[in-house]
Image (spheres, rainbow, N blue to C red):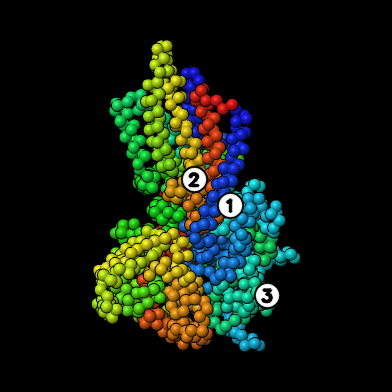
Amino acid sequence: MTRYIIRRILGFIPVLFAIALFTFVLMRAIPGGPFDFAGDKSLPPQVVANIEAKYHLDWPLWKQFLSYLIGDDLLGEEGTSRGVIRGDLGPSLRYRSQSVNDIIATTFPTSAQLGFMSLMLAILIGIPAGTIAALNQNTWLDYVSTFGAVIFLSIPNLVLAPILIWIFSLKLGWLPVAGWGAKPPYLLGFLPQPSQWNWNYFSHAIMPVFSLGTASAAGIARLTRASLLQVIREDYIRTARAKGLAERTVIVVHALKNSLIPVVTILGPAFAGLVTGTFIVEQIFGINGMGKHFVQSVGNRDYQVITGVTLVYGVILVIANLLVDITYAWLDPRIRYD
Amino acid sequence: MNLKKSFSFAFAFLMIASLLLAACQPQQVEVVKTVVVTEVVEKEGKEVVVTQIVEVTPEPEVVEQPVTLDWNWGTEPPTIDPSLATDTTSVDVIHNLFVTLTQFDPVTGALSPYLATSWESGEDADGNQTWTFHMRDDIQWVKYDPTTGETSAVMDDEGNPRYVTAFDVEYGVKRTLDPATASDYAYVDYIIKNGQAVNEGAEGVTVDDIGVKALDATTVQFTLETPAAYFPSIAGMWVNAPMPQWAIEEWGDKWTEAGLINTNGPYVLEEWIHGGELNLVKNPLWINADDVQIERIHGVMITEASTAFALYENNELDSTGVPLPEMDRVKADPVLSAEYHSAPVPCTYYYGFTNNKPPFDDVRVRKAFVQSIDRQGLIDNVLKGGQIPATSFAPPGIFGAPAPGTVGLQYDPDAAKASLQEYLDEKGMSLDDFNAMGITLMHNTSEGHAQIAAAIQQMWKDVLGVDVKVENQEWKVYLTTIKKTTPLDEMPHIWRLGWCADYPDENNWVHEVFNNQAGANRLRRGCVDDTCTEATPLKFDELTIQAQQESDPDKRAELYYEAEKQLAEVEAAYAPIYHYTSTNVTKPWLTRNFPPLGGVDFFNWKLDMDAKLAAQGK
């Protein structure tokens, strides 16, 4: 197992390199550069040249990419880039006093807290709901659960979030309209400080977590139901029953555990997607998360920011997928990686 | 995993969940102080000292709340470095942190003294125009210490407080023009002697050759390339603010962070959580500190207009913009309509014509398209924010701008039809032939632009019977598409843009935007390639150059009137549509202004904190 994990981690390197290369090339392939215009005003070519020289955008593309990857000193050039290999994701071209590392350090923790809580909510609702539906197939419990899942899957959070704000903040006055209860500096770089673990923090989190978590919960519930329905018709379930095991043991130990394999499979990408931030929910609730940088940096042609946040997403995705694969071995004893 | 184990898991989970839930509850601690009271009482004619322990529930401590404005910046300011700022949010922050040589009166919009108390123009030995500014000497450089919450004076090497001097202004101007600074707006200083040469990195000139010099600590002199009557407005722009050389050299790109930045304006930067909050506190050492009533600005960065509006309704913002979908409700609601205000903003929305692309190479077609736009109808039914219909380019408040509606082509469906018919007759075309030319209107992707385009497309259909195809592109792609270098068959016939004032003078409008040599010439008037400088200049282009060099204000205004008329009415080279407004709601406890040239100056606002706290139920 250890050798397998090491082999997988080494496999991350070409994957991340490919992500960086593709993002770099794609961003530069679309028309328009970061500094051609200030607002509606087109800038004189010399002004643009000065700015591009400052950020080395006047270099040939291969050299810009190497500078981004390994740093200016290894390239034998004057410059400040230390390269992605040494953890320097470069300067932001739009927010000119910040580096991409600054931006990620400020916004990622918030997104990660929100995303993690949403995923927990999704699992805590989704798996029990799916199980109940499957075990009571074609009864009212099944219909209610399926109906709820369809509703929550089909209401986009673009709609759900403003409705929640209108009811719980403006009409009832129970929850704050917008914002996030924790501020940097964060504990260990991503957790709220212990002094911020209070009602203020959770009251700000409830609506965004609910908006974000319910759609995933509905997806998980549907998947759990379908998978469990298949598993409980398997021979080994009949065997377990024939051995005289209690029904609860049959379901929890034998059926549910095996039926979780497809659920776990989607949890990897869902985790990566949620903890790196979601544009719409963060925007509606005014949360300073990383989601906006995936969208706005493309519009701003902020090359380093889009590559940086994509790399963060990539790292989390490959790690999450590795954890998923390890979980397979635990869920299904037939799977061996050695 | 056996059953027992899974139950213990469930149990452990429940324990953790209940702990978390418990932690969620607001803490209510009964505060009871025990106090030892010693008093002298008279007992049976004798004085006895009695000591007793009493339990006292203390009066709730009244914490004096600073007068705080809850504000929404709307977005993260890309920078608050005066040399680098280009957008309104950044400029708004800078305006509250830094003084500039001149300013615009927040009520009248007139150019008025600020750091400079007076200024005059002259001529140097070579006959170049000079502008000399005499500055006040009592404005201090300050810095804010986030650990102590104190604002203190910045000291020089000898331990004396630093005052803002002409040398700081000279440094600021040179820094903006230095190519190493890579300032976007350096070009507005190209009017200064050698400004362009230095910024372009020309041989044989250095930063020291730029025509700005501190004659003494309170006098700074600018030498210009060409005479410019509007130069005092340029001198007051943020890019020419005095800047703290010592701090910039010490901290580099990070000098604008909270705790490092040195400023000299009415407010200091308290905290800047990038993308989240930017908070200001009053500068106690400011020259007019007694007049600055709002002590703290709590500024969030909510991008979503409907969320900001919800915060406003919940008394969490003191003033905010009205999102278009809420406009009808705001106007109908008795409370909100009283809090509503629509203020002009010095910006103009227009449709440009590609003047060398058939059929828009013919003035009759352009006139027909302009005269069939019902601007007031568009404003009443689509925009709804009390915008001003525009028939010429520069909005009211800009020097030289004609009064709205006095110059240019009004909505006139009959004239429009006649104009198009005359063109069709001459060319021997039918309307179907005309429509077969596939006329395209392009705008950058945005719901608002799409609504306007749809409305105007319908007006053209109704009045002229022409079919116009509407297309849109992502902003940066769009800006590349409508460059004058784009091949003619890829260029749309009609395209939208807007323009906002950098400084309130027509030169910033008709000359910098539409002069076919000075501007981007997206209208493709006259000769379009860069090599044809010898062609006879068109009347409009001559007028804006003459006006630039004219020093008599009345004559300048007359020339600009002619220029506006020439472009919008005679050539009908573009279709001005409306002058922007900002639509805001403001809580009754906040007294704010709406400067005619836009911007926010918190130091001129007043806020009744008691009324605000009462409304919030605190």
Q: How many marks?
A: 3
Residue holding disc 1: A100
- Residue A160 is tagged as none
Of callouts 2 and 1, which one flags the residue occurring earlier in the amino acid sequence? 1
Q: Disc 1 sits on a residue from what chain?
A: A
Residue type marked 2: Gly
Residue type marked 1: Val
Q: Secondary structure at mark 2?
A: loop
Q: Is residue B319 above or below residue B60?
A: below
Q: Secondary structure at mark 3?
A: loop
- Can residue A105 be seen from the camera position used here? yes
- Can residue B54 be seen from the camera position used here? no
Q: Position of residue A158 (x, y in %)?
A: 38, 47
Residue at image x 62%, y 29%? A2
Residue holding disc 3: B203
Q: Position of residue B378 (x, y in %)?
A: 31, 67
Q: Observer-nearest residue: B572 or A136?
A: B572
Q: Disc 3 sits on a residue from what chain?
A: B
Q: Is residue B87 above or below residue B399?
A: above
Report, in whole angstroms, how far the alpha carbon at label 2 lies from the one at label 3.
49 Å
Residue holding disc 2: A277
Q: Do marks 3 and 1 share a chain?
A: no
Left or right: B178, with A171 as reference point:
right
Q: Position of residue B355 (x, y in %)?
A: 40, 75
